[in-house]
Image (cartoon, grey):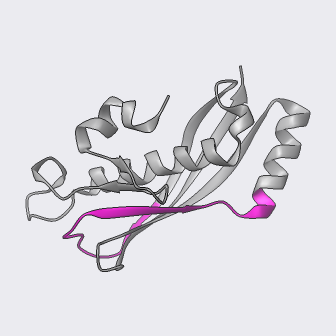
């Protein structure tokens, strides 16, 4: 499934940039009671971006596995007042370990690091998402 087709991502207006990063616009659907980006909306942007990162890191597993978010560690670092962009990364050693374990057992876990930045490049959110991935 392409990420813009996910109903919640579509509702929040998440967009895939030409550089491959997901963005979330600042609008009424994404704001909290004080006019900044809602914590839940930021979490959804980052979680969706982490899933997209998995898909891009392991394209051969797309449609052949069931990835499920197992755990998240989140830190909100400052008020988010503008559109937000998600930046994702997986440690290369984790990719190797995941691949070996998945090939041996048909399942594995992997960590995806995500940070969100505003339009000025200010870091507003950091998280580590732990995914459990099992073959179908």
Placement of 99 over or under 89, stated as above or below: above
Of residue 9 and residue 73, the one placed in the foreground of this image is 9
Residue at 40% from the left image edge and 55% from the top image edge: 17
Examine the structure image and report whether residue 28 is included in the region drawn in magenta. Answer: no
| Residue 128, percent from left and from top | 54, 59
Identify the residue at the far top of this view: 136
Q: How many marks?
A: 0
Of residue 73 and residue 47, the one placed in the foreground of this image is 47
Placement of 30 over or under 55, stated as above or below: below
Residue at 15% from the left image edge and 47% from the top image edge: 29
Identify the residue at the far front of this view: 18
For the C terminus, the quadrant is top right
| Residue 2, percent from left and from top | 47, 33
Of residue 133 and residue 13, the one placed in the foreground of this image is 13
Examine the structure image and report whether residue 82 is included in the region drawn in magenta. Answer: yes
The answer to whether 45 appears left or right of 64 in the picture is left
| Residue 129, percent from left and from top | 55, 53
Of residue 130 and residue 83, the one placed in the foreground of this image is 83
The answer to whether 124 appears left or right of 34 in the picture is right
Residue at 9% from the left image edge and 64% from the top image edge: 35
Highlighted range, magenta: 74-94
């Amino acid at each position: 499934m392409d990420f813009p087709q996910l109903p919640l991502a579509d509702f929040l207006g998440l967009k895939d940039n030409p550089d491959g990063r997901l963005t979330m616009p600042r609008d009424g659907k994404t704001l909290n009671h004080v006019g900044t980006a809602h914590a839940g909306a930021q979490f959804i942007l980052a979680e969706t971006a982490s899933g997209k990162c998995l898909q891009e890191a392991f394209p051969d597993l797309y449609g052949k596995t069931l990835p499920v978010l197992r755990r998240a560690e989140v830190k909100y670092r400052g008020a988010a007042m503008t559109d937000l962009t998600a930046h994702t990364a997986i440690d290369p050693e984790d990719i190797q370990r995941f691949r070996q374990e998945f090939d041996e057992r048909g399942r594995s876990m992997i960590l995806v690091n995500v940070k969100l930045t505003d339009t000025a490049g200010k870091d507003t959110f950091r998280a580590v998402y732990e995914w459990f991935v099992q073959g179908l």
